[in-house]
Amino acid sequence: MMKKFTKPGLYLLLLGLAVAFPWLKFIGVDKYQIRIMTLAMAWAIAALSLNLILGYTGQASLAQGAFMGIGAYSFGILAQRAGLNFWLALPLACLITAFIGLLVGLPSLRTKGPYFAIVTLCFNVIVFKVFENWTWLSGGIQGQVVPQPAFLVQRWARYYFVLGCLVLVLVVMHFIVKSLLGVTLMSIRSNENLAEAVGINTFRNKLLSFVVSCFIVGLAGSLLAIENGQLDFTITSYLYSFYILIYVLIGGAATLAGPVVGAIGLYWLLDYMKKVGIKGVEEFRYLIFGLILILVVIYLPRGVVGGTKQFWEWAKTRFKKKKTGEVLE
Amino acid sequence: MTLLRVEGLTRLFGGLVAVNKVDFEVPEGNIVGIIGPNGAGKSTLFNLIGGSIPPTSGKVVFGGKEITGWNPHHVAREGIARTFQTTALFEELPVYVNLVIGRRMRTRSGLWDVILHTPRLRREKNETTGKVMEVLEFTGLGQYANEPAGSIPQEAQKRLAIGVALMGDPRLLLLDEPTGGVGMGETDNIIALIDRIRAMGITVCVIEHKMRMIMSLADRIVALNFGVKIAEGVPQQVCEDPSVIEAYLGECIA
Amino acid sequence: MSFFLNQLVIGVQIGSQYVMVALGLTLIFGILDISHFAHGHLYMIGAYLLYIVMVLGGINYWLALIICMAVLAVAGVVVERTVYRPLRGTPQINTFIAAIGLILMLETLVRGIQPKALSVPKPIDTTLRFAGITMEAQRLIVIVGAIVLIVLLQLFIKRTRLGTAIEAVAQDREGASLVGINVNRISALTFAIATSLAAAAAVLMAPLAFISPEMGSMLILKAFVIVVIGGLGSIKGAIVGGYLLGILEAMAIAYISSAYKDVFAFAVLILILAIRPTGLFRGRE
């Protein structure tokens, strides 16, 4: 009985905190913090998108940075240059990103493991170079202005909008994971050959999850663009692909909370380290970042959330043993 | 009626001939045993039929349809299910989830069903759950339903692999050494299971090493050696065939 | 015509660098199954070490070359022991991620200490002219140096006991350990060889361009392209692929456009893997 209520209870509590966040001035939440949280949540959406292909079909894509940039630019160009209404530009930007994802996925999803990682990384580098050099598209160093619709001019409005998107993405992913589709994706990660042998078209499923993930990361990119009000070609950097991968792995792949915890936690940590770090050498935070990554992949391969879950399970069985006094195997 | 017919099936690996112009037939409703020493090409034969490897030449005809060179998932949907010599399961997933996955190809729910919460999704989930309960009982795995597949005993894993294969309503079941690594007493469990499968009307093709077991179980036997078929017929016949006796050094027991 | 020849020579020189880096990578990837993405950054450390030893320490270029190769060999062994060995047996993507962590550490460490691009003087500062070709002596040094090292590597693998042991592990790791070949020792040795080759590439290349913290990034991507196309673990593939890419790139810069020169290699890779998902030549799966 207790079990049934603790999990949704926890989520409601977190949601409540998230909703109350901008008003918590007494613990020091100011305009800057709200902005950081908004950006962190957009990155969380990007991390969730990678989680769909990495945690559930087992493919490590290093092109999420490129797709994020494509989504951001699609939105910027549609909203500013084509003058489209916000409610039309946003979904359209996501669809464009998903479509390009389809074009990229078709040739590359036949490769596996590190080959797939390298192909996607190469794609990201190509996209970056194109945006860097094709100034008509990207606006070069000046970049592209991103218009904010009237209802999102206020900082807290943008915060709640991004929060709403994050919750929506989490809900949809929750339904996917619990469904027959989710089970199918997990089977591909678990044992691709067996999945094929039991009649699952692994290529089609991998492509589907890739396209959906591109749709979601396109949304993340657009949200980042809206929050920043402007864009330049650096948003397509392959470094962002690495960061998104790191957020997912440190938070814990194959869980829903993992990527969110990883993205928001690490984004805040990086920002905090910027202030605490030695003056003028804020770059050093990436050194610690890299060290954390190595340590996590060696000692905590299931990430913070996965590791916590594992520990919890272990603690429960130990506790049960103690109670019954039995010596289980 | 012949359910499966294999004609001139050949597979070369570089210079090595793993399977050499093999022909045989599997009549519907039968249990056909495939025997042969190690390296005779038995598993490769299953891989060719199941689509994991394309044949170099030859034909595979199933239920009157030619399925040569089809992708594994295509072959599975057509009605051929298989198990593998090294037990293949979704190890970190619970036993019942393994079974659910086995049923997936017979369901049609996709992304839109998930997002829109269609009645089809709910219906197929219920149907799948029903089938899972059936197969859990049929294979005697009820007690392990929630355990990770990799953590249950070896012999139960073998039964689970068969269960997963059954979830898809196959017409033909290819079993690759279903009693491999399993002790004497537990072998009988699996033999009984195969008998019950035959009773359900499913045709079975079994690769086996344990001669006594296959002789009593099979209706027909196909013997391979060095990729070549050396004998085919009822167990008694095959047992008395001189080339089979030679290959097995007289180990045959009628 | 002489313009074309000049470009060809430059292509061979660029290719020489690629080959030296790709050789190490293909050995590590092919023999040890490790996605050693940090190889390019160890190359970068080699270049910075040259600066320290040669410009700050005043040591002669050729001696510095030897020092850098030796030190980097040790660094490679340390990296293998501390970062990759704990991950043996886990899915290969884990080594990729650990490598990314290492890259971040190395790059920010260097950038934090010295963010400006540095340069190193040429040991022989002359321009050679022959057969209608004009080229700086340093380019010839790179080409010759690469050939010398490749030949030495081949001799080592074919003629020495350790070398044949490496080849044995490349073909069958389990079998090799059953025969008593020490896999740990082979791993360390492979990393030592690979990293010292990268150091040599860096030292030979350094006088021709600037040394910067991000100089390893593009290089490692291209090295992966070469290794994948040439076949994991295939020395021949790395050599052919490296020179080919170098020449094609030089031609692309000269005759097409220099802005997109990097893109060229990657587009080729995507094309090849789209047609043959496991690479061109058969290496290890």
Image (spheres, coloured by chain):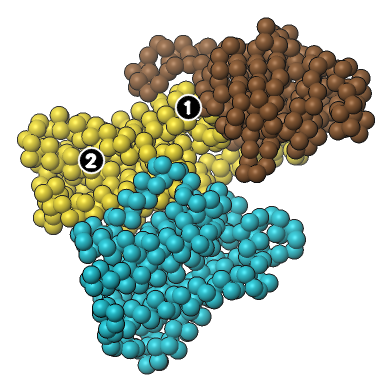
Chain colours: A yellow, B brown, C cyan
Give above or below for A285 relative to A241: below
The label nearer to you, 1 versus 2, is: 1
The residue shown at (88%, 23%) is B241
Give above or below for C179 relative to B85: below
Left or right of A12 in this view: A224: left
Q: Nearer the viewer, residue A204 or B53?
A: B53
Q: Nearer the viewer, residue A279 or C242?
A: C242
Query: On the image, numbered disc 1 is attached to which residue?
Result: A201
The residue shown at (75%, 61%) is C179
Q: Nearer the viewer, residue B24 or B101?
A: B24
Check the residue under mark 2 and report the chain it is in: A
Asked if labels 1 and 2 share a chain, the reply is yes
Can the viewer see residue B30 in this picture? yes
**Within the image, what quadrant is residue C251 found in?**
bottom left
The residue shown at (46%, 50%) is C280
Q: In the image, what residue type sits under mark 2?
A: Gly
Give above or below for B233 relative to A134: above
Residue C282 marker: none
Q: Earlier in the sequence, mark 1 or mark 2?
A: 2
The residue shown at (56%, 14%) is B65
Query: On the image, numbered disc 2 is attached to which residue?
Result: A71
Distance in Å between CA atoms under marks 1 and 2: 28 Å
Q: Nearer the viewer, residue B125 or C54?
A: C54
Helix, strand or loop at label 2? It is helix
Q: In the image, what residue type sits under mark 1?
A: Asn
The quadrant of the image that shows the C terminus of chain B is: top right
Left or right of B150 in this view: A139: left
